[in-house]
Image (cartoon, rainbow, N blue to C red):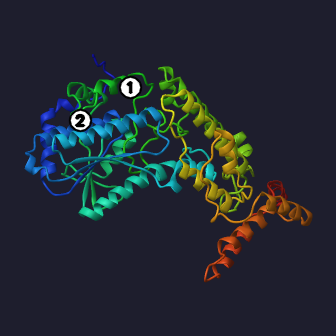
Amino acid sequence: MEISPLTEEPSAFDTRGVNDIYEEIRSIYLSDDRPWVIGYSGGKDSTTALQLVWNSLLAVPEEERRKPVYVVSTDTFVETPAIADYIDNSLAKINDAAKRQHLPVSATKLFPLINDSFWVNLIGRGYPAPSRFFRWCTERLKIKPADHFILEKVSQHGEIILVLGVRKSESATRAQVMNLYKIKGKTLSRHSKFPQSFVYTPIEDFSTDDVWLYLLQNPSPWGGNNRDLLALYKSASETGECPLVVDTDTPPCGNSRFGCWVCTLVTKDRSVQGLIDNGEVWLEPLLEYRNMLAATQVPENKHLYREYKRRDGTVKFNRNGSGAVTRGPYKLEFCEKLLARLLSVQKIVRENGPDPGITLIRPDELHAIRRIWRMERGNWKDTVPSIYRECTGEDLEWIDEDLGTYSGKEAALLERICAKHKVPSPLVTKLLDVEFQVQGMSRRSLVYSRIGSVLGEEWRSEDEIVHDVDEKP
């Protein structure tokens, strides 16, 4: 298969050959006892970095391969389904081949905590779809799982070396960040956050052509197919990938075959669209759902979907002097629609896609969303089970004992009483929820600060607030 030039980037092979790179890798590996952690996304760059390390270690005598090499891949729970399967298969092959070839390599997947997951934050807490102004997803879904693994290995071994498949030619920002943490006269760089961690970037000077040249001339040592990987990229509009994310300087991955299918950090999702154009038409409902999320970011429509208050109960105004309110989280009513739509999409892709057991939202995420709605958002009607039942025709084993005793009947009664006395019902709902949450505590002094926080929130309507602002001289 012929590779046509993609860029005018200089080649790393103009100054040194593959064997020189292998020798550098072996030298660093054998120089100390610090274990290696290799970030692997399944994309071309991380595959190249891992393959270089793997082939280098094969030339190390078996008795000297004492230092462990951990291959880690982060699963955000919202990976493009076809790619998630591809990575799962790749990790299984890596582990099997490492055992056969007697390499100290082990591959594992990292996951965000359930309370940090995309759906618990977007649907549960009402966080708006991520944007370049509020990119809340990266920290929770990618950085924190990687940080936890790194710190765990640092605690176990004292220091570690993080091997990343990143290249300076990806962007000027990437090159600047990589140069910033370089240790003068050394091959390794400092980690941006952890002093006990160092970073090694074996393909930092590779061009895009260098990456493909190496992959196509050197078969995968763990049994993967690099030509299939090239085919995956050739059918895409963009050639980027999501590396192991260890800082917020990493660009969004929505144009990437190896990004999240819900990504709204880019204007258009070429990733899922590319898969659909190449026959994966069952993914169309996912693309429609992603586009629906992106539509909520249109400034003139934000008031349709989002609260006028922030999650802490405060109201902020735009800094441009327009007097317009800066919108807060998604309204609970809209979150209910988002959940119902997602469950319907899950049912459709199970029926039309290749995997009848595909999961877009996990049961533990549904339980977490239910709890947040009831305990933090005043959802006494407890609508998560009914939405799930209506959309799937099934039911889960819902936990009732620790969710409180208030129900839709009490909510309707409270609405009538509050309307009669002209008191905001959400205020009373929240005060009652606070009282319930501190029941049984040996020290109830905490209840006073919580009540104070609730009373300190903004309880006027949006119209009243805007009117009062307009009335000010």
Q: Amino acid at mark 1?
A: Leu
Q: Residue at x 21, y 42 (%)?
A: 98
Q: Compared to 35, does 49 lie above or below?
A: above
Which of disc 2 and disc 1 is earlier in sequence? 2
Residue 456 as seen in the image, left or right of residue 95: right
Query: Do labels 1 and 2 touch, CB within 8 Å?
Result: no
Residue 23 as seen in the image, left or right of residue 5: left
Which residue was labeled with disc 2? 222
Q: Residue at x 24, y 62 (%)?
A: 157
- Residue 43 visible in the current orientation: yes
Residue 104 as seen in the image, left or right of residue 372: left
Q: Position of residue 167 (x, y in %)?
A: 31, 38
Q: Nearer the viewer, residue 175 or 293?
A: 293
Q: Residue at x 34, y 60 (%)?
A: 151
Q: Amino acid at mark 2?
A: Trp
Q: Secondary structure at mark 2?
A: loop
Q: Position of residue 396 (x, y in %)?
A: 60, 49
Q: Nearer the viewer, residue 71 or 354?
A: 354
Q: Nearer the viewer, residue 117 or 138?
A: 117
Q: Residue at x 37, y 42 (%)?
A: 243
Nearer to us of marks 1 and 2 is 2
Which of the image's four quarters has the N terminus? top left
Q: Which quarter of the figure has residue 198?
A: bottom left
Q: Nearer the viewer, residue 222 or 160?
A: 222
Q: Which quarter of the figure has residue 447?
A: bottom right
CA separation, marks 1 and 2?
Answer: 19 Å
Q: Secondary structure at mark 1?
A: helix
Which residue was labeled with disc 1? 232
Which of the image's four quarters has the C terminus? bottom right
